Image (tube, rainbow, N blue to C red):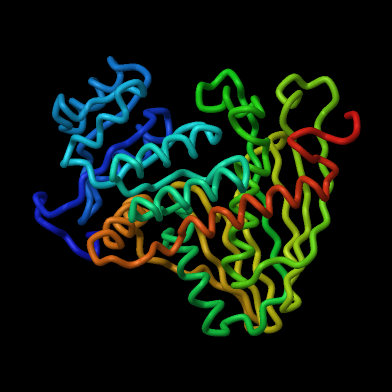
Amino acid sequence: MQPDLLLPPGERLGWAIVGLGDFACNQILPAFAACGRSKVTAVVSGDRAKAERVARQYGVPAHGVYTYETFDQIRDNPEIDVVYIILPNAMHAEYTVRAAQAGKHVMCEKPMAPTGAECRRMIDACAEAQRKLMIAYRAHFEPHNVEAQRLLREGAIGELKLIVADHARLLDPQQPQDRWRTQRELAGGGALVDIGIYSLNAARWFTGEEPTGIQATEFSTPGDERFREVEESISFVLRFPGGVIANCLASYGVERCKRYRLLGSEGWLDLDPATEYHGNRLVVGTAKGHEERIVAAGNQFAREIDHLSECVQENHEPQTDGLMGLRDVELIQAIYQAAGITGGEQTRER
């Protein structure tokens, strides 16, 4: 699918990609080929040789290659308009603040940061620099999720009553992209922070409300070294003021699943899978039966990236702004507290 607006290369905003791990190299960088408002003009990595290799692959000039030590020099590069931070969670606040101070707009991966205080620091830094801050909630730009939201708002399933949301995968510390996720200092938490955030953010998005009640319980397999510092599984229930209940599970200990079910007074919506990079499905059910809704394909990453570029070019606020990121982090902390995990540590022995 073509982007909504295809600008000439000279009119597209330049993006610096900070962190060249598996996700950045296999999902984000390739997505720029489907963008109409955005282009890659810089890369940043702790491994300069890797950065140079990636730069050559995507046509980034030599002066657009940076290491973490030279990151602040981006302020002198007018070809960089936006910085996309794809680093371990504990590094998000530092690099967001530094990017804003360098005069750049910021896209930051979720979760926004490990603590609410860090989130506020990020928001304040971008506001002070008069730069946009967007948190990378890609599901808000994924076509099946967008269609589900549209159907919900149009009353296709009547009044929303219940949300069931499960996100799980097997954590493998032997893989570079998972190694840091076993360390609380870098990740800020376990399954809830990494994949449970999809469920809690979806519950807030689909209801349009903030939860007023929380119940939660956590489990980690005794003796499993992967979960010495972070939780393996957590189940939580959110109650919303309009009466909706969201029943959610996040786990690093069971096979991969990424699904939502939205249950209403006159039908239901199934997104299964809901948040894969490709191949998501939406089924609509009513008393008359059910059918899969065929949704026009579209690159969720390209749409997300171009959304921030549009916000910068037309001076409006991102759909998934820093306040959304802050609210999710505050909710994560409240869920941990409800599960008996406070201050980053469990209050009971496993």
Q: Is residue 130 left or right of residue 221?
A: left
Q: How many marks?
A: 0
Q: Is residue 303 above or below residue 171?
A: below
Q: Is residue 82 left or right of residue 240?
A: left
User: In the image, residue 38 lies at what x, y percent?
Assistant: 23, 50
Q: Which residue does the image show at 51% across and 59% down from the upper left?
A: 281
Residue 44 percent location from the top left of the image: 31, 28
x 46%, y 67%: residue:
146
- Vertical order, 291 against 156 (above or below): above
- Is 47 located above or below residue 41 in the figure? above
Percent coordinates x, y for residue 62 in the rendering = 15, 24
- Using residue 149 as the reference point, say whether residue 213 is left or right of it: right
Residue 41 pos. (x, y %):
20, 38
Quadrant in the picture for the C terminus: top right
Identify the image quadrant of residue 297.
bottom left
Residue in the foreground of this view, choosing between 18 and 133: 133
